[in-house]
Image (spheres, rainbow, N blue to C red):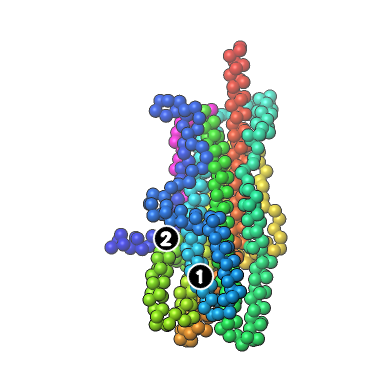
Amino acid sequence: MNRFMNLLTKPGTKGEVQGVAPTQFIEKNGLEIDAPITTGYVPKSKPRMLDRWLDFVVRMSGSEPVFFFILAGLLAWALLGIKYGTTDIWQVLISDIQAIVSYVFDSFLVRQQLNAYDEEMTVAAELQSRILSHRRMLEKLDLQTEKKDPEKQARLTTIVAQYQNTPEFSAELPTEGRFGRTITWFSHVLGHLGTVTLYWVGVFVWIGLGHLDGYSNDWQLYMNSASSALMVFVFAFLANIRERHAAYTHSCLNAIFKVDATLEYRLRLLTDDNLENDVVILPAPKVSGVQRAIFYYADFVGTLVGITILLVMMIVWVAIGPLLHFNANWWLIIGTYAGLIGMNDGFVLRNMQARLRGFADLEFDKVEAEETKLFASVGQPMPVKEVTGPKSLTHRVSEAMNRVCAHEITVVAGFLVIVGLIAGASAMKWTLTGQLLCNVPPSLIESFFMIILITGHNSADDNKRVELQNIYERRLSLLAFVNGVQTIRDEMSDSQKDE
């Protein structure tokens, strides 16, 4: 019974994270090692085959072939709509396709977010693990001789500057290709406050013109079709830029970890230190009961169990088709179900993005604080910290809107809206109009939240790129300093031999 209860309560728990940087031994089994054992960043492989398979599917959902396939599908739907667009079935069809595709992509995006959090926390733990070794070995260097001798201190400063000016110490992380930069630029356009404003202007224009068509089902279907097509595009685009930016982040981490491994190895050679790197345990973040419930639901969605439930619902939906003579009302049923769940997932996704990002940022702040202590301990100036540019009014308004949309209360409010929509449709006995009530507002709200999600992703990605650049520059500066110390001591050793 206890095991069963533990299984039920495990989802939603953001527990402690353990990480240890691979030790760059200078000797193993009595044999000297002439080069670092591990270079670069190596993502951790999940032990379960099912998890690895699900992660592969999620990566493929954000790939370029899938993105262009969905764009081609939307174009085909638009062209065929010239002939069939006036029929209710045609417009309901895009609503169903959108709801199902969005439902599936919701699950993929949740898993993407959870994977990104686990990876960032592990990276932070490994960086902190290696910093502990750096600190121990820098203390063992005993730099008093260099500090007390002005001539040696000046010589050390000159040599460090020479190392920093060499090509191999140029603080340049990998860059994206032209297509990647174009997609990144477009993501900033799509997530801009101006785009959000235009979106709502279009919605209010549609509402204002409703009286011309008597606020009919056709009038609702027009907006439902337009917002459905937009949402399919936004979901595919968001999955693509997330995978693209994740790949870019991996290349940056690879460069950082190579320098960090080299720095550790050089310090070990200088200090004759062969102790293993310490395991670092990052404590579990504290969350409220409401936030824990949101994480619980996200873990449920992230395991893609929801997709299995959708498949069961589709089988039931097909089975009742003959009872409803496969009419427009029947076609909307599956779209209504997927649309309502998708709307709730949109609220959860925005909340997760902000909360998990905040937890990871706290750990990377600790990395920066520890690095500051390293530079102070050896009397070296910290490299000038690069920061994002000044925030415009539009950016500040966007961030404020993001904070509101990410709040736990907003998620709860979204759930209550869904309950209200279901109650309204039930009062209408789930007629076509009643089902449209559960399709159009959720479609509009979820489209808005997906655009806001892009805004939040852009802000987080911009900050992360600057953060990685700063970490890289600090590692290069420390490596140049250690190389300088090694050069000074080699010169002293050679001088003593000559004497």
Q: Residue furthest top?
A: 499
* Amino acid at dot 1: Ile
Residue 160 position by quadrant: top right
Q: Residue at x 71, y 60 (%)?
A: 392
Quadrant for the C terminus, please.
top right
The image shows residue 155 at horizontal and vertical percentages of 67, 26
Q: Residue at x 45, y 74 (%)?
A: 334
Q: Which residues are magenta?
A: 270-282
The total of numbered circles placed on residues is 2
Q: Is residue 154 above or below residue 246?
A: above
Q: Which residue is label 1 attached to?
A: 97
- Which one is nearer the viewer's eye here, 228 or 264? 228
Quadrant for the N terminus, please.
bottom left
Q: Label 1: state its secondary structure.
A: helix
Front disc: 1 or 2: 1
The image shows residue 379 at horizontal and vertical percentages of 63, 35
Q: Is residue 448 visible?
A: no
Q: Is residue 323 visible?
A: yes
Residue 303's label in the rendered image is 2
The image shows residue 130 at horizontal and vertical percentages of 51, 40
Q: Residue at x 62, y 27 (%)?
A: 146
